[in-house]
Amino acid sequence: MIICKEFIEKNVDKVSFHREKLLKNPLENNKGLYHFKSKELEVQNPKLNLSMIKGASYTNGSAVAKTWSDMLKLLSRYSQYVEIDCERNREGYPSVDYYFGDKYINDDPWGIEFINGVGYILEGHHRTTIAKYLAALEKIPNEISGFKYARYIEIDMSKFKQYNKIKTYINSLPDFISKNISFSVTSKYTKDETKENLEIEYQTIFRVKVGIVYFYDENIEPITTDFNTISTFRNEIFKQLRQLHSKYKYLILFCSFVSKINFLKNFIKTCQPKSKE
């Protein structure tokens, strides 16, 4: 009998990913990404390629694990998945036969989340880590069943980058303008429960509302649009400004003038040759 954990520890040098970085689930690293989801699909009893699993959620020691090597060392309990026999068909003792099953058969949840094609362990850190090493050492196939579910999430990174660009643009404006721009993002979704697997479509919505000197006209509805370019955003801002009470018209013109002056100053600054030290 060859105990799985002992076998892996003796052969880790043969595992190509052993010292690779353990990726962190981006939805846990940056909660703001939730608003930029475009699609979500949950599949029950999937068959998955272990090489597509590159990271983990913040549980079972993975919060401090930086590499798969760390993950292997930090497995917090000696469970049946760590102590199983590496040889198949062992009667009366748990073996790698577990990984040759064709469906989920355990009460202990086992789930993987794929974000833009990269897999992260949500539940079943021990089983998944051991399985990756056993597959690399050719004790089990690289593609296995037995998972309870796999969740596939697509995040619209182009919209996320555009959101950050707009936030940067707002911060570049004079304080008395930027402090009076309310810019936020939200999302709405539709579920399709008619299909075998749950499928959700998301729509990211940008919202902006502008005031002057902390004055807001409640009759002006917030603008909701994609804001595909900074110029589109800028035009919409001043479109809202023009709808404010007429007594602010000179301040609005001044704001526009200051923005253009700042742009010219930054342009001239970038064109100046760097001084030689």
Image: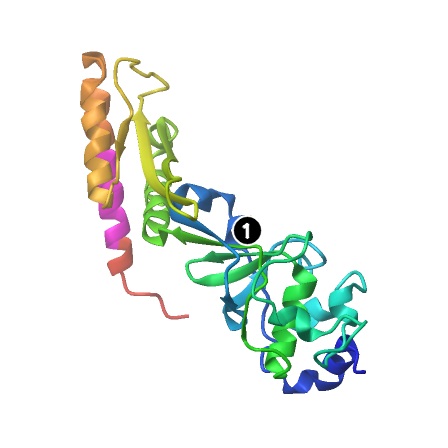
Relative side of 187 to 83, left or right: left
Label 1 neighbour load within 10 Å: few <14, some 14-19, many 20+ = few
Residue for point 69% across, 74% down: 96
Secondary structure category for the residue under label 1: helix
State the colouring used for the structure image. Answer: rainbow
Q: Position of residue 119 (x, y in %)?
A: 51, 62
Q: Nearer the viewer, residue 208 or 195?
A: 195
Magenta segment range?
256-268
Against 3, residue 154 (above or below) is above
Q: Label 1 belongs to which residue?
A: 29
Q: Position of residue 190 (x, y in %)?
A: 36, 36
Task: Decide if residue 74 is in sight here.
Answer: no
- Image quadrant where residue 147 sits: bottom right
Relative side of 204 to 241, left or right: right
Quarter the N terminus occupies? bottom right
Q: Is residue 264 magenta?
A: yes
- Image quadrant where residue 122 sits: bottom right
Q: Which residue ends up furthest to the front in the rendered image?
A: 91
Amino acid of disc 1: Asn
Relative side of 5 to 24, left or right: right
Q: Nearer the viewer, residue 25 or 51?
A: 51
